[in-house]
Amino acid sequence: MAEVYSISMNKGGVGKTSLVTNLAGAITKQMKKKVLIIDTDGQGNSSIAFGFKQPNDFEYTIYDVLMGEKNAKDVIIEVSPHLHILPSNKDMNFLEFDILPNLHQYGEPFKLLTRHVVGIQDQYDYIFIDTPPSMGLVAGNVLAIADKVIIPFAPETFGVNGLINVIEGVSDFKKKENPSLEIAGVVGMMLDSRTSLHGELIKQARQYCFEHDINMCDTVIPKSIRFANATAYDGKPATWSDSNNPIVKAYYELLEEVLPHGKKG
Ligand SMILES: Nc1ncnc2c1ncn2[C@@H]1O[C@H](COP(=O)(O)OP(=O)(O)O)[C@@H](O)[C@H]1O
Ligand SMILES: [Mg+2]
């Protein structure tokens, strides 16, 4: 049974897609486990990261699955034998418009994804779900099926209050909708060691997590504009390159921290 990870943060540009694609890439390279990425963000960046340049060309996507018109297995694409993607594209930007006025047809609003994931869960070791930068219908559906949440914290983009909001949102969701949901870890993203503000904000985040019994990973992903630009055109995640770059090393270290138990069940 696959363990299901949601990468959640209601802001854009904080490294959600980078975390999803690099952790998935690292697992398949290092462990020969089978991984599925489910992209639920209308930008379709998870498939772009693996070289699919035009997500809008996908005939069917997660949108058709959530609308109940396609089965997940008919939409999933194979990147490699061990890495599959259930892609997304701009159709997802209309999901709430299409579902909310007709909710009575769909049953429980946060259970649109559940049966589809349950139906394919035994075919993978890990499922990583990339999410949009908002806490709405889509984020709720993802948290309803997730076992664990990874929360990126990019100090450049927002302060510790933004992080606290998401942690509280996830805890609230756990109480009301998914009691088995756990925060696997908060991960410092795109850290510039020369910027003292970054260090200060990470310290504050660690303090908050410590006080609230939340795991904040020791590993942080350093910032490297040059490397980010290079991988953006490479058509594969950084963890699939042979680079000795600190970013690649950090992702492999992070993997050890967030997947301590390996395969579940
Ligand atoms: N370690 C890093 N250093 C510098 N830039 C990065 C790093 N990781 C990701 N980026 C860049 O930051 C931007 C936002 O990252 P992304 O993963 O797409 O965030 P999100 O999915 O939260 O919107 C992208 O342009 C990406 O290439
Ligand atoms: Mg993204």
Image: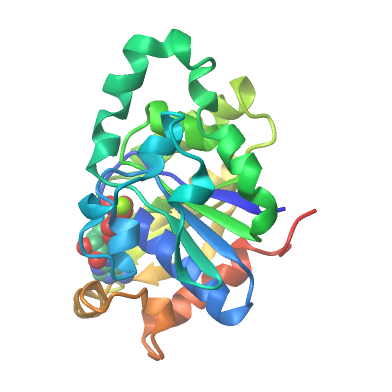
Residue 24 seen in the figure: yes
User: Would you say 185 lies left or right of 135 here?
Assistant: right
User: Would you say 53 lies left or right of 32 here?
Assistant: left
For the rendered model, the colour scheme is rainbow
- Residue 150, how many percent across, how many down? 51, 51
- Residue, far right: 265
Q: Residue at point 36% right, 19% down?
A: 99
Is 110 situated above or below 256?
A: above
Residue 50 in which image quadrant: bottom left
- Residue 140, how many percent across, how many down? 47, 29
Q: Residue at point 73% right, 62% down?
A: 263
Camera-side residue of 204 and 233: 233
Is 126 situated above or below 33?
A: above
Is 228 situated above or below 135?
A: below
Camera-side residue of 193 and 112: 112
- Residue 65, how many percent across, how many down? 44, 37
- Residue 85, how many percent across, how many down? 44, 58
Residue 221 in which image quadrant: bottom left
Is 139 situated above or below 4?
A: above
Q: Residue at point 20% right, 76% down?
A: 233
